[in-house]
Amino acid sequence: MTYMKTLSAALMASAAMATAAAACEVTLRSADTHPDGYPTIEAVKYMGELIQERTDGRICIEVFHSAQLGEERDTIEQTRFGVIDMTRVSMGPFNNLIEETKVVSLPYIFRSVAHMNTVMDGPIGEQILAAFEPHDLIGLAYYDAGARSFYNSQRPITSLADLKDMKVRVMQSDIFVDMMDALGASATPLPYGEVYSSIQTGVIDGAENNPPSFESSGHFEVAKYYTLDEHLIVPEALVMSKTSFDKLSAEDQEIVRQAAKESVPHMRALWAEREKASTEKVLAAGAEIITDIDKTPFIEAMVPVYEKHVTTDVLRDLVERIQATE
Ligand code: GTR
């Protein structure tokens, strides 16, 4: 291509983009802590494409990745107050705000990721989504986040004894602090963005997460021992500000809800691919993945956590129904 042709092609492309952007009467700003390309980000972008198509370009979503709009606790607050329109976060940081979310954050409450998906796709998932509304949030969908396991910079964990007295970062929820206590370790609740440097400088020994986060955060570079004890299977939530939702017509609200629903299978497919790719990447970089671990003592140690946190009839009923779900 000649210089002039390249230039006019570039000008036409930017004019087309400007027209598309101008056509968006409403741009919903959505926050996420993960880097661009992560399955949750791509799923919300996909949802945005569906919405744009179905509203003839009137409504768009702009995804702000890499915690550009803040850490999860902040984006939840900002979404409640309508400063941000949407946020995609783990259910963990909701625990101290919305009682029902505690149930899905209990260690070993789900027998497998498939069990979690069945529960969240059914009436229990619906009940928990509805619990967001009194807190000025509209629960739109659940995403998959696999299972979370421990990693650290010190030694391979093959039993509870190896975990003893280790300083481990957890998400900011009392359940996770009590979980670490029950396991004989010491919990350090921190925002996600502070974990890398805290391990690197020795403020903490490690953290816990799923393989895609272990990889995309770079934590594997500073904490190479990763033990697949799978103590938490916490679903992720995509929530919208009630203030922003109420501004949409009933028809547009339905389009948003439906597009969120349709983004779920797309997300799950991306998740499966990413889990595999992340595992390969960390192994190639020298991480050690310990799979030979007896989970029984870990599961048994959780009794006091359930006793302390499952304290109301609503929570007891949810726990029983989850356990009874095949
Ligand atoms: C990730 C999750 C994030 C965030 C992060 C954390 O797996 O997708 O939403 O919760 O873990 O540990 O803070």
Image (tube, rainbow, N blue to C red):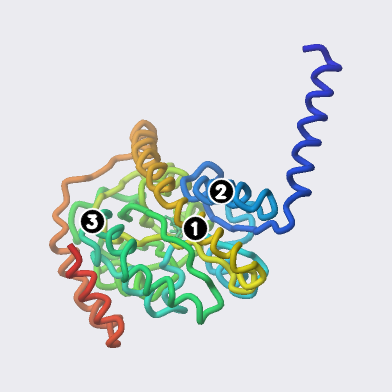
Tell me, yes or no, if residue 300 can be seen here: yes
Kindly report the distance in space between the C-alpha atoms of the residues bearing marks 2 and 1.
9 Å
Name which residue lies at 30% across and 61% down.
Answer: 232
Kindly report the distance in space between the C-alpha atoms of the residues bearing marks 3 and 1.
27 Å
Name which residue lies at 23% across and 56% down.
Answer: 112
Q: Is residue 243 above or below residue 46?
A: below
Circle nearer the viewer, 2 or 3: 2
Q: Answer yes or no: do the residues labelled 3 and 1 have beta carbons within 8 Å?
A: no
Mark 2 or 3 closer to N-term? 2
**Residue highlighted by disc 3:** 112
Q: Answer yes or no: do the residues labelled 2 and 1 have beta carbons within 8 Å?
A: yes
**Residue highlighted by disc 2:** 50
Q: Secondary structure at mark 3?
A: loop
Task: Find residue 123 and report its horizontal and vertical position in percent.
Answer: 32, 70
Q: Is residue 190 left or right of residue 279?
A: right
Rendered image: mark on residue 258: 1
Task: Find residue 253 and report its horizontal and vertical position in percent.
Answer: 58, 65
Kindly report the distance in space between the C-alpha atoms of the residues bearing marks 2 and 3.
31 Å
Q: Quadrant of ligand 1?
A: bottom left
Q: Mark 2: few, some, or many residues within 10 Å (few <14, many ≥20)?
A: many
Q: Is residue 73 left or right of residue 231?
A: right
Task: Point out the image quarter for the C terminus.
Answer: bottom left
